[in-house]
Image (cartoon, grey):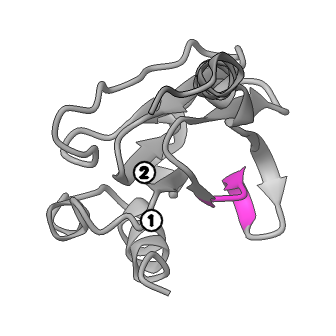
């Protein structure tokens, strides 16, 4: 049995268009937010593989960069420039911890959960953080399985 050409072309068009279904999520970098001073809002973002997150410096002196040891195996770390929006595509399922480098010790951290996030969650929980970031990250990772 031969497949009609229009079905083949339709399937090819859908496959080519699938990246257009990816969503973009926005995380703001704030001096003051609902959770206090020096925060990402939202601090926990759940996305599908292939989605992007744009980190927007709503206030000056912030950046977003991955935390060593808090990315899934094979995922590329990221580092945004100070005071510049940074868009990151998340292709691998797992947990990605990120920080604002100047305000890391003050607790300015966040988590992106891609897919179910379970792939590297135990390893992410083992990473040490300075100052207030320790408690904030513990709280965020505690929400991943919910």
**Location of mark 1 (residue):** 132
Up the image or down, 53 lies above or below 138; here it is: above
Asked which quadrant contains residue 86, the reply is top right
Is residue 111 rendered to the left or right of residue 25?
A: left
Name the residue: 17% across, 70% down: 122
Q: Nearer the viewer, residue 94 or 139?
A: 94
- Give the main secondary structure of the magenta stretch: strand
Instruction: Answer few, some or many: residues within 10 Å of disc 1's Cα (few below 14, many 20 plus, some between 14 and 19).
Output: some
Name the residue: 63% across, 30% down: 18
**Location of mark 2 (residue):** 105
Q: Which label sits on residue 87?
A: none
Name the residue: 29% across, 69% down: 118
Name the residue: 83% across, 68% down: 34
Q: Is residue 62 visible?
A: no
Mark 2 element type: helix
Up the image or down, 104 lies above or below 130; here it is: above
What percent of the width, then of the height, locates residue 41?
74, 54
What percent of the width, then of the height, locates residue 65?
45, 30
Task: Point out the residue furthest to the bottom here.
Answer: 146
Instruction: Answer few, some or many: residues within 10 Å of disc 2's Cα (few below 14, many 20 plus, some between 14 and 19).
Output: some
Q: Nearer the viewer, residue 114 or 1?
A: 1
Disc 1/disc 2 C-alpha distance (Å): 6 Å
Please say if the residues under marks 1 and 2 sit with CB atoms less than 8 Å apart.
yes
What percent of the width, then of the height, locates residue 127?
19, 58
Is residue 141 rendered to the left or right of residue 62?
A: left
Q: Is residue 141 visible?
A: yes
**56 within the magenta span:** no
Start-end of magenta stretch? 36-45
Quarter that holds the N terminus: top left
Mark 1 element type: loop
């Amino acid at each position: 049995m031969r497949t009609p050409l229009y079905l083949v072309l339709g399937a090819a068009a859908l496959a080519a268009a699938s990246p257009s279904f990816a969503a973009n999520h926005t995380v703001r970098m704030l001096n003051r937010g609902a959770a206090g001073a020096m925060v990402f809002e939202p601090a926990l973002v759940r996305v599908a593989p292939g989605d992007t997150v744009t980190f927007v410096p709503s206030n000056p002196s912030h950046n977003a960069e991955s935390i060593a040891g808090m990315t899934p195996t094979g995922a590329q770390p990221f580092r945004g420039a100070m005071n510049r929006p940074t868009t990151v595509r998340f292709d691998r399922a797992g947990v990605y911890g990120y920080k604002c480098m100047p305000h890391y010790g003050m607790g300015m951290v966040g988590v992106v959960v891609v897919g179910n996030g379970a792939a590297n969650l135990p390893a992410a929980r083992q990473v040490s953080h300075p100052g207030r970031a320790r408690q904030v990250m513990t709280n965020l990772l505690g929400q991943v399985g919910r």
